[in-house]
Structure formats: C-alpha cells, structure tokens
C-alpha cells in the first residue's frame, strides 16, 4: 500500500498542496513558540558590570504570603541588607565580597550617556580600568568619557548635582562611579546594597560556596554563570513569566488550529476520492489497507513539509522575540535561545497532527461499503456520526460552561482567563456539527439572496441544499477565521476601554507634571504656589503583597498600589471615598477599596499588613475606604512610603487640580522649564500610562491573532480552491445543457455570497457567545467596545478570500471546452 501511496501522490499533487502548506505554517509557528518558551525559561543575560565576579548575591524577588503556596513576584529591586556583607565575607571559600550601591544618575553634561551611579569600590566587579586620572573622592566622579578636572552634572533624585571629574574609566557603558561616602548619601536606601559581588578562593567548589551563602538568609538569591546578568537587569526575570505564558498559550492554540486545518484538508481530499476508494474496496482492498495508504500519503506529504517549515521557524521565532522586546513584553537584554527542543516540538507536533488528521480522514473512507462509496462519491449526504456528535456536543457544552463561569464567577480582567478558551470550544463545537449549522443558516439567508438574484440564485440555492454537507467544509474555515479573530480582537479593545473607564471615572486631575529623571519636593511646592491650583500631589505606582488579612480580593500577582500625598475631599486622588478621609494619609497608613473592607472586616481604624514591592514588610492603619470597580481595585498609600520602596526611589509624576475656569498652563510650563527634564501634560497622559500594560498585551494579541488569522486563511483558500476544482464535471455538464460561462460564474458568485454570509453569521455568533459574558463582566455593557472598522475589516477579508478562492479557479476551469479531458 505504501508503493500505491507513492504512485497516488505523483498524480494528485494538487490535492495535497493544502496539507503541505498547512504543515509548513504550523511547524514554523510551533517552532517559533518553542523558541520563545526556551528563551523565557533560560532567560540568559550575559553579565557586564558584574562579569568579574564568581557569584552575585541578590535579594529574593518573590514573597511567599502566609497560608499561600504561590509566591508573589516583587517588582522592585529587593537588595541585600548591608549588615549581611560581613557574614558573606566570612563564609568558607569566599576570598572577597563587595557591596554595590546602584541609583539613577542621568547625565546632562557627560559626552557618553550615563543612567546609573555606583560606589567606586564596586568598579572592581566589572572590572573598570582607569585610563586617566584617579579614584573619586568626596564631590568627585569617574565617568566613561570626559576631561579630568572638568565638571559633570547629573540628575539625582530629581535635582541637578555637579561633580568634578577625577578620572575616566573603560568598561561597560552607561555607568558613573562616585566615592563610597557620596554613594551612600546619594542612594535612596543606604541600608541595602543592590547586590554583592563575591570572589571565591582558587580551587574552591563554587557550588558548595553558593549553597553556604544561601543559608545565611532565606531572603537571598545567589547567582552564578550566565544568571549573574539577571542581577544587573532584574526586570529581565520579571518578564520571564509573561514570555513563557504567551509562548505556551499561543503555541497550544497554534497546535489545535494546525490539527483542525490539516484534518479538514485531508478530510476534504479523502471526500473527493470516494470513488477511488470504492474501486479499491471493490477489488478486495481491506479497510486497514486503505487506512495505511491514506496514512502513508499524509506522512510523505508532512515529513518534507516539516523539514521545510523549520527554516522559517528559525527566523519567525527571533522576529517575534524582537517585537516582544521592543514593546516591553520581553527584556531586550535577554539572549534569544532556540535549541533542539523547539525543533523537536515543532516537528513532532506537525507530524502528530498529520497522523491524527490522516486517521480521522481515513476512518469513514476505510469502513464504507463499496456500493455506498460509489453513490457517495457523486453526492455526499451523510454527515451524522455518533463520535462526531459526541465531541461536537462536548465542545459546545464546554463553551457553555465557560460562558457561565465568565458571567457568574469571574470579575474584571480575570474574565479573560475563561472567555479566551471559550471561543475555541464554541468554534470547534460548531465546526464538528458543521452541516447542521450550515443548513440552519442557509435556511435564513436563502430567501433574501434568492429574491435579489432570481434564476441564478435559485440554482445556487438548490446546489447548496443538495451539497450542504460538502458546502459545510467551505463554510467552517470562514466561520473559524471570523469567530476567533473577532472574539480575540474585541476582547482586547473591550478590556482596554473598561480599564480606562474604571480609572478615569474618578480621575479628578486636570494636568500632570512628569519627568523620567524624577522630581524633587521643590517642584511640588512651586506647583502648589501657582495661582489657580487648588490641589497638587505626588503620584507613584507599585505593587504589594497583602499578608493580612489573608482573604483580601487580590490574586498571587499582588495588589496594585498607588501612592499619593495627604489631601482633602477636593484633592487629586482618583478615588470616591465612602468612609474616612485622606487628610491623614501620612506615615504608615492606607486607604482600601470598600469591597475589600466588607469582605475582610477591616474598615477605618483597623490594620492591614503588606509586603511592599522591594520586600519590606509594613503594618498600616486604614484611614479611608473608597468605591472601586470589581477587578480594578487598588490600594492607596502615602506617596513618600511607596516611592521609598521602589527601585529608583523617584517621584515621576505630580497631579494637579485647578479651579474651574482657570488657565494655569503657562504658569505650570514656567515651573517645568525651571527643572530639567520636567514637562507638563494633560490628564490623557495618566490614562494612557494606566492602560500601558493592557495596551502592550493588546498589541501582543493583535500580532499573534494576526498570525493565526493568516494561518486560518490558508485553510479557507485551500478548501475553497480544492472544492471548486473538483466540480469541473458539474460545470461541464451545465455548459453542455446550454449554460454560458457568464451564467455559471453568476451561479458561483451567488454560492460564494451564501458561503460568505453563512460563515460570517456563524463566526459572529461564536464571537458573541464569548464577548457578551466577557463584556458584561468587565464593563457596564454587555456589548463589546471597539471600532466597528475591526469587524468590517474581518468580514471584508473573509468575503475577498471566499470570492477569490472560488471564482479564480472557476475561471481557469471554464476556459476549456465542456468536452475537454481537463474536466475529467
């Protein structure tokens, strides 16, 4: 049978092009996702500033809450307590240990760009080598380039500070070194080193020393080898989980889509060859031999396609990683890794998909009786099967269950965790029961189409009614493309809009002053003194873990924290108070959402315990409660407390509220001009930054969904082209009975219209089954939010693909005379 399969492929190349192309695309996508996952797991960052160290000691960037099994990631640099340096130095096998202070120091006068400052003693960790001058003393600095004895100005803590250049050092760029005494004063928290570089004695077992250092304190992490680079770039580790989850979820969807597409193309090819299989069965071929032949054909097509698909997979993975890095989803300092595992995963998934699809396609062809097969070859009517019915109803039931969970259980952005998978369940369930849904939708559209198209419309409708089982194979890819793309794109637009609405509903700031280099307290004082300004407050963001009470309505990712200054009822804080006041928001205090107060019983006057973003535990007294949209709750803390426990320790924004009818823009611009790096913006800046993470996530989904749409489009084109070409006999018979080429094309145009309408209708229904409960959960409306142009573009694309894939092959076929052998 394998020899017969080889000979069959020689004469049916066009019938297997669809499978060949689908496997190539699927292999490339799965392989690219495998590369992204391996990159996220490895997170290799080559050390630069710490390259001369044997080991690097850092703080543990996660916190295990009491009674929880899942650790909460800490977004700020945790650091190493200064008092632990002596214990690290005294550990067996350690020859030296150097603490490193790291703080923002943005240069405004040095030739080469400098963004970080350090203590001079940590220069040996790179190492940096003096090429001119000497080590810095108090009031001096060593820079990457400059003139010894000249002046260098740095923005430190929002204030420009001038130092004398004592030396020039060669080494990794972007760093300046101050005297140890000055560094301890310039760093925001002198009680913690950013990290500690460790040198071990020659011949010492590095792993043994690493284990000894880890036992010094349970909150320390000891890194060796390439992991030392993560100490320089702690944000790279925070991006690891996001990269792995994106690669895993998209890779899983890609595998399922590939399985569906390959199965549909092989099933369609097998359906068109029923007469051939009938003849084989008639001469004594067993069902097992037919299955073996179909499986052999699938493997002979899939294996070369897998080998070819690995080539674009290499470039696609790197391209996706670069795009994710440029949009803040992945750290650009991480090295892209794509070893043999992604190759094996992509190839294995593609081959298994081809095998599974071949077995599914061969099931009916192998078991059908020869006489029945000859009848079915001319006109297929049977589609019902208990296996198909069972799985179709199972997927529809899964979609219904996820719909109920989304509407009744989930809150806020968490609704996407169940709404996303539900669209796949609905789509697969509808596809498995495709002939039923196709007949149902065509029964609705047939009358308006027939009224508009008359004779050709009636002929097209009768064709589709008689060939509804075969036509469902053309409708289902259109449904899949429209349903998945519409649901995923509008989920993102709806979520971004809901987050913006939840934030802006209580936002009372009229303007904002912002600076990436931070702002000093002087800026805030000057803004408050501007005539017409009724309130001004610092604004800082971070994340914290709630240790007590344990039943707070926040997940293991932590609670979003907003830091603002104490203020009255007319202040700028984006909250609607329900109890208490923000006038006492100073020191160790907090304001919490009303829902949290109700659920935990911690109202005004009670205490809560948090672990701030840098791992510092605090006990706070609740001074106010406020209304908040479910799923978008935050904690309100004093701005000074939040800023002191962030990585850079800077206040980068000041919210301003003005008296009605007052124009304070020129006065604020004058204040900003007096402080380098400060600029004035309107409230839309805050809204944009608040939704920045969601916008990034939306962009990622747009890109990934776009790839899936393109992949599904391949299935649409392949299916329709193959279906049209297989109808050459039918077109020839119509021509022989008096129909002109134009009349046949008009009939096919009407058929394409019905297929498009049916696919878009079913796809829209699938999308709405996902979007309605999702929108009702995260917003005040059950209708999704987003520009109608998205839906129109999707529908137009589906229509163009359908008409092009039907009419172009038909035009090629109709060029020949009805009696031409090309119609056989």
Image (tube, rainbow, N blue to C red):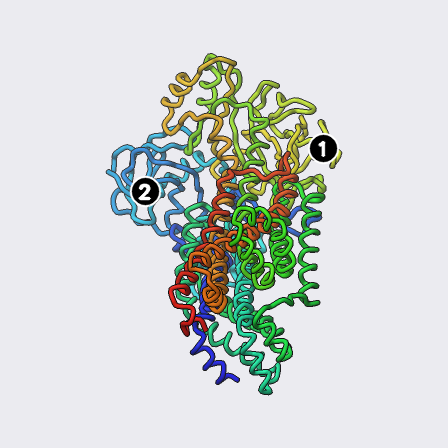
Q: Position of residue 288 (x, y in %)?
A: 61, 82
Q: Where is residue 41 in the image (x, y as percent from the top left)?
A: 51, 58
Mark 2 residue crowding within 10 angstroms, few (<14) / some (14–19) / many (20+) = some
Dot 2 corresponds to which residue?
A: 135
Q: What residue is rendered at 33% in x and 38% in y? A: 141
Q: In this view, does 479 lie to the left or right of 137?
A: right
Q: Where is residue 105 in the image (x, y as percent from the top left)?
A: 39, 36
Q: What residue is rendered at 55% in x and 36% in y? A: 497
User: Element under label 2?
Assistant: loop
Q: Is residue 51 above or below residue 493?
A: below
Nearer to us in this view, 498 or 536:
498
- Marks 1 and 2, Cα distance to the nearest angstrom? 55 Å
Q: In this view, does 769 lie to the left or right of 653?
A: right
User: Element under label 1?
Assistant: helix
Nearer to us in this view, 92 or 12:
12
Q: What residue is rendered at 54% in x and 57% in y? A: 459
Q: Position of residue 460 (x, y in %)?
A: 54, 56
Which disc, if any, is residue 597? Answer: 1
């Amino acid at each position: 049978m394998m020899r017969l399969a080889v000979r069959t492929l020689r004469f049916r190349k066009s019938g297997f092009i669809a499978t060949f192309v689908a496997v190539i695309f699927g292999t490339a996508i799965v392989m690219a996702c495998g590369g992204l996952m391996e990159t996220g797991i490895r997170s290799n960052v080559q050390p630069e500033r710490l390259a001369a160290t044997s080991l690097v000691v850092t703080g543990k960037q996660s916190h295990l809450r009491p009674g929880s099994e899942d650790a909460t990631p800490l977004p700020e640099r945790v650091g190493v307590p200064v008092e632990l340096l002596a214990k690290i130095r005294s550990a067996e096998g350690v020859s030296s240990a150097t603490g490193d202070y790291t703080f923002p120091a943005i240069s405004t006068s040095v030739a080469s760009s400098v963004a970080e400052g350090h203590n001079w003693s940590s220069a040996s960790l790179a190492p940096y080598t003096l090429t001119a001058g000497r080590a810095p003393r108090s009031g001096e600095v060593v820079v990457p380039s400059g003139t010894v004895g000249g002046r260098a100005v740095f923005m430190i803590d929002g204030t420009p500070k001038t130092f004398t250049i004592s030396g020039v050092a060669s080494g990794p760029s972007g760093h300046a070194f101050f005297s140890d005494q000055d560094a301890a004063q310039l760093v925001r928290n002198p009680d913690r080193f950013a990290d500690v570089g460790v040198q071990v004695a020659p011949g010492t077992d590095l792993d043994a020393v690493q284990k000894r250092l880890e036992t010094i304190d349970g909150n320390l992490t000891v890194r060796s080898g390439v992991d030392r680079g993560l100490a320089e770039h702690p944000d790279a580790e925070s991006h690891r989980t996001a990269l792995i989850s994106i690669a895993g979820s998209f890779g899983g969807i890609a595998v399922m889509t590939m399985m569906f597409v390959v199965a549909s193309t092989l099933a369609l090819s097998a359906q068109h060859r029923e007469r051939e299989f009938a003849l084989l069965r008639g001469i004594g071929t067993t069902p097992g031999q037919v299955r073996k032949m179909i499986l052999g054909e699938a493997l002979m097509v899939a294996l070369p396609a897998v080998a070819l698909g690995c080539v674009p997979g290499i470039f696609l993975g790197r391209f996706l990683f670069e795009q994710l890095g440029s949009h803040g989803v992945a750290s650009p300092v991480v090295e892209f890794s794509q070893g043999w595992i992604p190759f094996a995963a992509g190839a294995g998934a593609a081959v298994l998909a081809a095998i599974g699809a071949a077995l599914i396609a061969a099931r009916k062809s192998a078991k059908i009786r020869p006489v029945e097969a000859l009848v079915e070859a001319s006109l297929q009517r049977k589609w019902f099967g208990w296996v198909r019915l069972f799985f179709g109803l199972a997927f529809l039931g899964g979609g219904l269950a996820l719909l109920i969970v989304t509407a009744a259980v989930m809150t806020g952005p968490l609704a996407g965790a169940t709404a996303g998978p539900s669209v796949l369940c609905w789509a697969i369930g509808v596809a498995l029961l495709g002939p039923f849904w196709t007949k149902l939708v065509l029964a609705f559209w047939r009358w308006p189409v027939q009224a508009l198209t008359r004779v050709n419309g009636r002929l097209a409708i009768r064709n589709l009614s008689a060939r509804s089982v075969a036509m469902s194979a053309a409708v289902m890819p259109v449904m899949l493309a429209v349903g998945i793309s519409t649901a995923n794109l509008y989920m993102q637009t709806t979520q971004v809009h809901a987050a913006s609405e939840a934030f802006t509903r209580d936002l009372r700031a009229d303007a904002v002053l912002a600076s990436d280099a931070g702002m000093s307290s002087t800026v805030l004082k000057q803004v408050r003194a501007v005539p017409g300004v009724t309130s001004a407050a610092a604004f800082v963001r971070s994340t914290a873990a709630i240790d007590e009470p344990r039943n707070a309505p926040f997940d293991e990712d932590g609670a979003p924290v907003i830091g603002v200054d104490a203020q009255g009822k007319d202040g700028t804080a984006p909250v609607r108070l329900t109890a208490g006041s923000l006038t006492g928001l100073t020191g160790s205090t907090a304001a919490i959402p009303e829902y949290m107060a109700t659920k935990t019983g911690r109202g005004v006057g009670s205490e809560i315990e948090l672990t701030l973003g840098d791992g510092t535990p605090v006990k706070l007294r609740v001074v106010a409660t406020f209304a908040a949209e479910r799923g978008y709750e935050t904690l309100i803390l004093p701005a000074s407390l939040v800023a002191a426990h962030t990585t850079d320790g800077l206040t980068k924004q000041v919210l301003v509220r003005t008296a009605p009818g007052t124009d304070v823009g020129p006065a604020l611009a004058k204040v900003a001009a007096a402080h380098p790096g400060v600029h004035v913006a309107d409230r839309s800046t805050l809204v944009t930054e608040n939704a920045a993470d969601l916008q990034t996530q939306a962009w990622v989904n747009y890109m990934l969904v776009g790839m899936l749409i393109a992949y599904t489009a391949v299935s649409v084109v392949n299916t329709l082209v193959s279906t049209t070409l297989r109808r050459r006999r039918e077109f020839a018979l119509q021509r022989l009975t008096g129909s002109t080429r134009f009349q046949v094309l008009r009939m096919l145009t009407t058929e394409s219209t019905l297929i498009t309408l049916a696919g878009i209708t079913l796809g829209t229904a699938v999308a709405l089954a996902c979007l309605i409960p999702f929108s009702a959960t995260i917003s005040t409306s059950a209708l999704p939010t987003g520009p109608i142009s998205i839906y129109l573009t999707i529908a137009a694309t589906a229509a163009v693909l359908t008409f092009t894939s039907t009419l172009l092959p038909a035009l090629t076929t109709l060029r020949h005379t009805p009696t031409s052998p090309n119609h056989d």
